[in-house]
Amino acid sequence: MAEKNRKIEQAVLGHDGGGKLWDRAFAFAFKGLVYAQIWEDPVVDMDALAIKPGHRVATIASGGCNVLSYLTADPAAIDAVDLNTAHVALGRLKLAAAQHLPDYAAFRRFFAEADRKENIAAYEAHVRPYLDETSRAYWEGRDLTGRRRIRGFARGVYKRGLLGGFIGMAHLVAKLYRIDPKELLDAKDIEEQRAIFEKRLAPIFDKRFIRWLTDQPASLFGLGIPPAQFEALAGDAKMSDVLRARLEKLACDFALEDNYFAWQAFGRGYGKADDAPLPPYLQETNFEAVRGRADRVTVRHISMTEHLASSDDESHDRYILLDAQDWMSDTQLTELWTEITRTARPGARVLFRTAAEESLLPGRLPDALLSNWDYREEASKDFTKWDRSSIYGGVHLYVLK
């Protein structure tokens, strides 16, 4: 366990093990469950990456939603890696559930509703026997309240973890100003969504307490944003103004019937209606494909750089780095991209996100290394615009020359 914690601290603090107080506080917070649901849009990912049958994909696992969603594109293999033990356990749970729950209804109830006592019986009967020992020990272990972690799927798992706690706290603070974020979910169309946002939600970001609170680096730990990324996200602006702009996109730029990220943010879970928007892996039309291809996924507790260093030359076609590079030093970036370039097959694509709008690679990677890659700048701007999660400043696509 000490070695696992050391890897997380190294990822946040850099190779020298240094770091400020806020960095160490974030590293401590990140050791538990952060994302019960990943906050990168898998539809944008698959459009940008053009995953095809036969492709081998390397991705950071995070909450596992996108890993399973990529299976709908029919790749030959997906290598999912993560330094967070909770995310590894969650990814393996989703894979075992997809393969062994009796039908789509049980699968949907387990992950789309995630607050039904029937889920615990389904876990015991159909999922538990197929989990590896480490993942089973995690889910049957106790959380800070003394309850088994698997009980989260009977009590609302999307309200848990750092992100779930952050969203819950945001709802609580809003209610102190007599604002209920769930009001937005009653909108009938995009025009009404904007009207509700501008009248009810936007003014809260002008409150003196909110402007002070959001200037504290720890205030965004629940979004999985470490101090270095916090500084990049804010830039020269007030953080409250940045967050208002990102929330405006989430609330106003996409119809509610198509954006499950909005339901998570404003409703603290997926919608209950039969036609509620869901990630690709939870949609009924994709269930058999996800079930039949789940054995193509391997989830490992290891960093992306370590995984690629153990892989053969020209062994991967697609890479998804999420926002992990925002945490990295120049040395770590160079080590990662050296391995990406070595293991990339002809035509390989790399997709990542950044808190700030611009790509972080120019000026930080050696020119000789970066020159192997073509940055698709205009396409990246489009992918950023289309990303329904709306949190990130930039979605960036690089293609091997």
Image (cartoon, grey):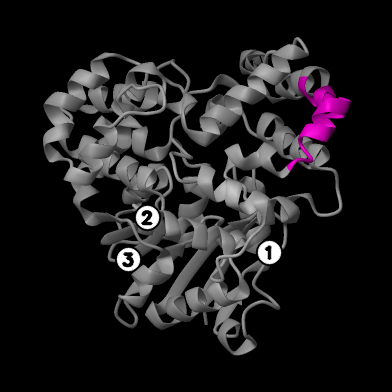
Q: Give the residue at the far top of this rendering.
A: 178
Name the magenta segment's main secondary structure.
helix
Residue range highlighted in magenta = 201-216
Residue 255 versus residue 81: which sits nearer the camera? Answer: 81
Q: Residue at x 55, y 78 (%)?
A: 334
Sequence order check, earlier mark of 3 and 1: 3
Q: Residue at x 80, y 37 (%)?
A: 240
Mark 2: give few (<14), some (14-19) or many (20+) Cα within 10 Å.
few
Name the spot of residue 221 as percent of width and height, x first: 61, 41
- What's the distance in space between the residues labelled 3 and 1, CA to CA? 25 Å
Name the spot of residue 165 as percent of width and height, x first: 55, 28
Pointer 1 residue = 378
- What's the distance in space between the residues labelled 2 and 1, CA to CA? 44 Å
Name the spot of residue 306 as percent of width and height, x first: 38, 70
Circle 2 — which element? helix
The quarter of the displayed image where residue 99 is located: top left
- What's the distance in space between the residues labelled 2 and 3, CA to CA? 35 Å
Sequence order check, earlier mark of 2 and 3: 2
Sequence order check, earlier mark of 2 and 1: 2
- The question of residue 4 being in magenta is answered with no
Q: Is residue 123 visible?
A: yes
- The question of residue 211 being in magenta is answered with yes
Pointer 3 residue = 55
**Going by the image, does 69 lie left or right of 19?**
left
Q: Specify the amino acid type for callout 2.
A: Ala
Residue 4 versus residue 341: which sits nearer the camera? Answer: 4
Pointer 2 residue = 2
Q: Residue at x 54, y 27 (%)?
A: 264
Mark 1: give few (<14), some (14-19) or many (20+) Cα within 10 Å.
few
Mark in the foreground, 2 or 3: 2
